[in-house]
Image: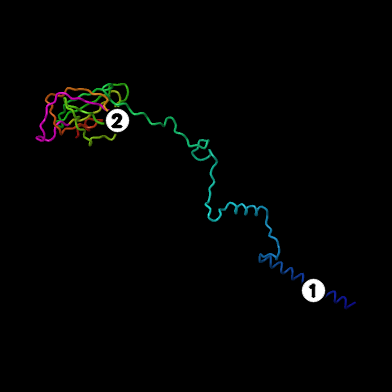
Amino acid sequence: MRTNRIRTIAVAATALAAALSLTACGGEDKAMGTKPAGAADTATPAATGTDDKARSDAPKAGEPETQTVPAEGKHAGGNGNGKKPETAPNEKAAPSIPACTPKNSTVKVSSVSRPINHLLLTVTNTGTTDCAAYYAPFLRFDDAQAVYPVLDDSKPQAVVTLSPGQEAYAGISLLGEPGQNEPVKSDNLGVIMVDKNNESKGESTLKLPAETYTDSLGFVTYWQSDVENALMF
């Protein structure tokens, strides 16, 4: 009986030692973050789904990254149908202003005291709407075949626009340096107004001041908004 009891105690001690050994190994595996051989990987459904989506969204090696495009009609500046907004009717280019012509304006020529050997040409809008004094007037003294030279340096920054009753001015230099050319006496002056394409829109014939002499070195300026600018050249 005593021998059997001793044998039973020995067996129990051996079993207890084995259990403790297994427990110690399991705790060490847990502490080190390792898993027993053959153990299956486990993860929560939510974590697995997130990892799978992140892996599927990431670009593969060698493939360009892509960006999300807003739905049609939702992009910035759209008008709800996926197309760019069209220009509003009031944003269309304004029509050009009609030219001042013998039909809506009058022209006169007058003498000036300064500078010497100059005349002043004045155009007045006699119509009921605005008109524009485009470029420079084309001048012909008496029966001259060629038009008088135009001074390019007198070109203003903007076309002179005249409301009804307003005036524009052009200066006429009659002579060059004394002795360079033989002056020619002239009695009449033809003034041709032009449109925005620099094409003739009609001619007015004016009587020149008495004893008007010209030569080939004279010129006429572009239309100006004031007298001082017209006579400064």
Residue 17 in the image, given as x and y percentages of width and height = 77, 72
Label 1 vs 2, first from the N-terminus: 1
Q: Secondary structure at mark 1?
A: helix
Which quadrant would the C terminus be assigned to in this image? top left
- Point 56% across, 54% down: residue: 60
**Residue at far bottom of view:** 3
Query: Which one is in front, 126 or 216?
Result: 216
Q: Which mark is residue 14?
A: 1
Say if mark 1 contacts mark 2, CB within 8 Å: no
Query: Which one is in front, 56 or 161?
Result: 56
Magenta segment boundaries in residue numbering = 173-196
Q: Quadrant of residue 204?
A: top left
In the figure, 79 relative to 210: above or below?
below
- Nearer the observer: mark 1 or 2; the answer is 2
Please name the amino acid that badge 1 sits on.
Answer: Thr
**Residue at far front of view:** 145
Q: Which mark is residue 197?
A: 2
Is 174 contained in the magenta span? Answer: yes
Query: Which one is in front, 214 or 77?
Result: 214
Residue 62 in the image, given as x and y percentages of width and height = 53, 55
